[in-house]
Image (cartoon, rainbow, N blue to C red):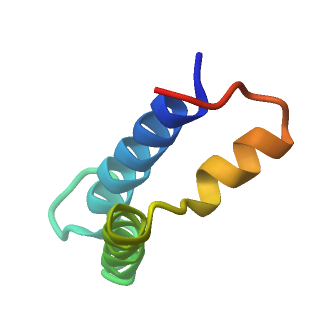
Amino acid sequence: MTSWRLVRIIAGAFILLSLAFGIEGSPLFLSAWWLAFTAFVGANLLQSGLTGWCLMEWLLRKLGIAPGC
């Protein structure tokens, strides 16, 4: 599995989990502050799209995950 595919999987999982933890009424609700984490992940995805550099992909490459699409 390539680093870019893992980045997408990790980002999607982070967003879904943070929404489940942050939306009041959810069975997994912990705190509304989890929505700030959702915004953080979204901002990082936007930054990555604009600059072409992704911290998560860089970390995965350091762990030995193959780069590419």
Query: Camera-side residue: 66 or 60?
Result: 66
- Identify the residue shown where x is 70% and y is 25%: 66
- Identify the residue shown where x is 30% and y is 49%: 16
Identify the residue at the far right of this view. Answer: 63
Whether 24 is drawn above or below 9: the answer is below
- Identify the residue shown where x is 54% and y is 63%: 53
Query: Camera-side residue: 36 or 56?
Result: 56
Q: Is residue 48 left or right of residue 26?
A: right
| Position of residue 25 measured from the top left corner of the image (x, y, whole percent) | 15, 63
Q: Is residue 26 left or right of residue 2?
A: left
Whether 43 is drawn above or below 17: the answer is below
> Dividing the image into 4 quarters, which one contains the N terminus?
top right
Q: Is residue 44 left or right of residue 28?
A: right
| Position of residue 28 measured from the top left corner of the image (x, y, whole percent) | 34, 53
Q: Is residue 11 left or right of residue 38?
A: right
Identify the residue at the far left of this view. Answer: 25
| Position of residue 48 measured from the top left corner of the image (x, y, whole percent) | 42, 64
Q: Quadrant of residue 19?
A: bottom left
Q: Quadrant of residue 44?
A: bottom left
- Identify the residue shown where x is 20% and y is 67%: 23
What number of labels is visible? 0
